[in-house]
Image (cartoon, rainbow, N blue to C red):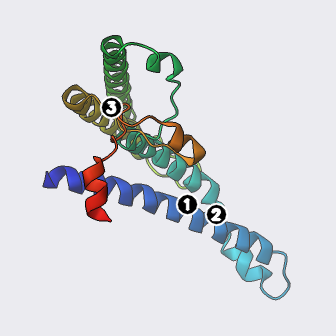
């Protein structure tokens, strides 16, 4: 669907932008601190002092973490211990995985709702951040937005698992060749005829 593709793209662009801005701010702050001790330019560097840089980067990394967690669910890159689950028979394994995904849906929906309540309450106060004086409800807005997006991703994965019996999963390095063809989340080997047709 076009809407889902746009959401996926927006999610990736947002995470990348937050990371790029945080990196640029940290770099500029370090350069200005260095120039503040250099003759002839130290006066200018001191006037341009970025005392708010640390606070901004903390906010950016918090937002990045919340939306990055949602991306991790969609891409299947979250760390998980599945040694015991993989030893179960297909039917019990399917039940356990489904319960786990439902737990993710429940947890993220609760966190998102509590975060929305927090944002609503803080929005009726004059609370601002210490250095940038940004309204704190804007800062905490990442909690409901990121949590609800993560909840949506869990629902996506759950529906896909019910239909296909597979969950998003990425394999890295040498461990990839150890996976058996047709295992959960992995494509099975192509028929021998298909291989010959490509050669």
Residue holding disc 1: 22
Vertical relation: 109 (above or below) 136: above
Vertical relation: 186 (above or below) 61: above
Secondary structure found at label 1? helix
Where residue 121 sits in the image (x, y, percent)?
A: 36, 30
Residue holding disc 3: 116
Question: Crowding near pointer 3: few (<14 within 10 Å), some, many (20+)?
Answer: many
Residue holding disc 2: 26
In this rendering, the label closer to the viewer, 3 or 2: 2
Distance from the alpha carbon under mark 3 to that under mark 1: 25 Å
> Viewer-proximal residue, 4 or 128?
4
Distance from the alpha carbon under mark 2 to that under mark 1: 6 Å
Residue lying at 47% horizontally and 16% vertically, measured from the top left: 87
Distance from the alpha carbon under mark 3 to that under mark 2: 30 Å
Vertical relation: 39 (above or below) 36: below
Residue 136 seen in render: no
Tag count: 3
> Viewer-proximal residue, 55 or 106?
106
Where residue 63 sits in the image (x, y, percent)?
A: 46, 47
Q: Are marks 2 and 1 in contact (CB under 8 Å)?
A: yes
Along the polypeptide, which appears first: circle 3 or circle 1?
A: 1
Question: Crowding near pointer 1: few (<14 within 10 Å), some, many (20+)?
Answer: many
Where residue 96 sits in the image (x, y, percent)?
A: 36, 14
Secondary structure found at label 3? helix
Residue lying at 86% horizontally and 85% vertically, measured from the top left: 39
Q: Are marks 3 and 1 in contact (CB under 8 Å)?
A: no
Q: Which mark is residue 168?
A: none
- Quadrant for the C terminus in the image: bottom left
Where residue 33 sits in the image (x, y, percent)?
A: 76, 69
């Amino acid at each position: 669907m076009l809407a889902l593709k746009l959401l996926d793209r927006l999610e990736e662009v947002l995470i990348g932008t937050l990371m790029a801005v945080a990196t640029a701010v940290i770099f500029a702050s370090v350069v200005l601190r260095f120039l503040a001790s250099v003759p002839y330019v130290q006066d200018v560097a001191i006037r341009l002092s970025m005392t708010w840089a640390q606070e901004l980067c903390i906010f950016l990394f918090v937002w990045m973490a919340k939306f990055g967690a949602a991306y991790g669910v969609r891409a299947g890159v979250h760390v998980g211990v599945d040694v015991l689950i993989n030893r179960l028979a297909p039917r019990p394994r399917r039940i356990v995985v489904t319960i786990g995904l439902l737990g993710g849906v429940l947890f993220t929906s609760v966190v998102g709702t509590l975060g929305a309540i927090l944002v609503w309450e803080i929005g009726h106060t004059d609370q601002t951040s210490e250095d940038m004086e940004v309204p704190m409800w804007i800062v905490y807005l990442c909690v409901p937005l990121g949590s609800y997006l993560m909840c949506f991703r869990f629902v996506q994965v759950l529906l896909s698992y019910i239909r296909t019996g597979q969950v998003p999963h990425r394999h890295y390095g040498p461990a990839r060749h150890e996976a058996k063809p047709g295992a959960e989340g992995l494509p099975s080997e192509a028929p021998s005829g298909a291989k010959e047709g490509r050669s």
